[in-house]
Amino acid sequence: MEDISRLRNIAVVGTHHSGKTTLVETILATCGAISRRGSVADGTTTTDFEPECIEHLQSTCVGFAYAACGAVDLNLIDCPGFIDFFEETKIALLAADAALIVIEPDPGRIGQTQSLVDFIEAHKLPHLFLVNKMDRPGADFLGTLAALQQAYGMHVVAQQIPIGAGETYRGFVDLAENKAYLCNECEQDETEIPADLQPIVSEQRTKLLEALGDFDDHLLEELLDGIEPSREEIRRDLCEDCSHDRIIPVLAASGLTGAGIRALLETIEREFPSPEAEPRHDSAGRLVAPDPHGPVVAQVCKTFVHPQSGKLSVVRVFSGTITADTPLVDASRGGVAVRPSGLFRLQGKRQDAVKSAIAGSIVALGRMEGVATGDTLTSPNANVTMPMIEPAEPLFALAIRPKEKLDEAKLSQMLARIIDEDPSLRVARAEFTNELQLLGNGEIHVKTATERLSRKYHLALETAQPTIPYRETITSSTEIHARYKHQTGGHGQFGDVWLRIEPRPRGHGITFDEQIVGGVVPKQFIPAVEKGVREALLHGPKAGFPVVDLHVTLFDGAYHAVDSSEASFKTAAAMAIRDGLPKCNPVILEPIVRLEIQVPSAYASTIVSQLTAKRGQILSYEADEQRPGYEKIIALVPQVELGRYITELRTASQGLGTFTWRHERFEIVPDKVAQTIKEPAMA
Ligand SMILES: Nc1nc2c(ncn2[C@@H]2O[C@H](COP(=O)(O)OP(=O)(O)OP(=O)(O)O)[C@@H](O)[C@H]2O)c(=O)[nH]1
Ligand SMILES: [Mg+2]
């Protein structure tokens, strides 16, 4: 059986392309968990195994891996760095006991880590920063350290100073030990501290010791008395402070060359906590003791769906021990019994069967149909659910339909499986157009999901920007006469109507009434007149969009005792509408969206100019009370301008801007814009 104190569950997170997947690969190879180190470029890494990852050379979902490393057993969760996949990363972080934040050696990119670090800090997850890619030309460790300290405070402290940078990067000084090491791939040999590094080593070492002194009076006294604290004391404090999230160490490495990796692993082993260190609380705030002999409490942190072999639910076990025979219920679904067909440890796509999984471990359960990501699985009657993140509001939508005719039920089944794998996706029918849409957290998120859908279920999809639900209306009144008369021998057709067409205020819809005096249009034909009116209003005179917000009065007409019928009055009414609307100064209406944007203050003015360029109207622009350093901008913007807005907002704000939106109203489209609006395809 596993030993809980040996377990280290680590989410490998960080900015996009900072080298997380490569680093995990190097760690696995260093620990002997894989025989050959793969590469992202060749599509041969352990954790980027999904075809979408390989094709796009980036992680598009989390990947799991494990390795025995010295005195600990590592469970690594390689998280995607791209902001579109942040929801997936958040769920993975809930399953981990510590976060390894991998960043570029570039101070200019520290801003991009803010939402991630905010989340990690809010969950009090011990973490460290790894300044990766130190072999890259221009790598700037000290600048990056300063930017980290500026962003996250002075308890972010260097634990190492790299020796050299770019091509000359060749090792590091361990500030706790005050010793230097030269690296050859993953190996490291002690060496002299280079003389030119001595001043910076002394300065940063003092900062490290002072930070430790903030939480250790004995060490502080030693510092004040000029006594050198012992190596053991420094190590012990670092270990205590990091595992309790009081100190955030900064290390340097190159996941590509392997330099610094051995020291990183030693740091993880010493300073990251085991699952016992910080017991979790359930949704009701009760302690869930990480006791392998207690009742089972586990939570699904990722679901993989295989078209043939079914679902694989990866769970983090918080309490108890799961075996193939352990009775389990899904506490999030009314306590229905569930039974895994097998237990596996995942090494990327490889499934290694195991007999049991104790509290603290991460294990995949086979064929758990009906179980979804976020669900809590427990022993029967344990009556516990674990907290889950609130689902994020979607920020990007694509209209989807199968290329081949496929019954709706089949498509919705496939969509449901895609959502099983990634609960931050949504499927919805759009308001006003009833179009089927796939929604998610960004353009790449939704596009990758459609690719996955096509690949897994051999389903060719057509995707398009969602249809904008334009409308038409009128701005002046008219009275119009139409007579429909048709004589083809025998029974003829005769309908004659006078209609008054008048505008109504925005959002007031279509109304109809009649003021017929003396039965000039017999009562039984009046409903047909209304029907003719309403049908004709489905296609407006400007560009064929439905006409809204007007009042039609039938005030006169004529009939023929033999030839008049419902059909002839309906046709006459439709003719009157078609002839009458162009005389009422018709206009096109467009949907206006109310956006509420949150963005760091530094980017707010750029965002406001962008909104203005989108014909947006700024309603308010003020400091966000909920989030220090952020502005809240509320604006009304035409929906047509917002198809890719989340991409534009993120590009302009280092990925940190976000928004919520809702349909506000319809407004008249300016003439210039109206000319560019094409007629809708007739259904
Ligand atoms: N020079 C250098 N390049 C690296 C290093 N680590 C990764 N790379 C390169 O950086 C690119 C991104 O590497 P990945 O390992 O996919 O990065 P990632 O952080 O997993 O990317 P996402 O998961 O998409 O956020 C690839 O081209 C790697 O070869 C490194 O230590 N040094
Ligand atoms: Mg990756």
Image (cartoon, rainbow, N blue to C red):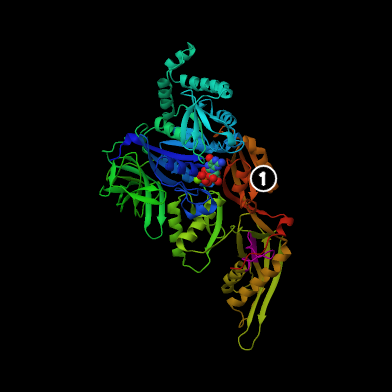
Query: For the N terminus, which image quadrant?
Result: top left
Name the side, left or right, on which 340 lies relative to 184.
Answer: left
Residue 395 spot, x, y in % from top left? 55, 49
Residue 83 visible in rendering: no
Residue 677 spot, x, y in % from top left? 68, 60
Q: Check disc 1 and report its element: helix, strand or loop.
A: helix
Residue at numbered disc 1: 611
Q: Which residues are magenta?
A: 536-553
- Which class describes the residues within 10 Å of circle 1: few (<14), some (14-19), or many (20+)? many
Prevailing secondary structure of the magenta residues: loop
Residue 51 spot, x, y in % from top left? 48, 55
Identify residue type, mark 1. Leu
Q: Is residue 645 above or below residue 168?
A: below
Q: Is residue 101 magenta?
A: no
Residue 133 spot, x, y in % from top left? 55, 38
Quarter where residue 289 is shown: top left
Residue 395 visible in rendering: yes
Toward the bottom, the furthest residue is 489
- Foreground: 595 or 173? 173
- Foreground: 226 or 282? 226
Residue sitting at x 37%, y 41%: 386
Name the side, left or right, on which 253 lies relative to 30.
Answer: right
Query: For the C terminus, which image quadrant?
Result: bottom right
- Foreground: 551 or 646? 646
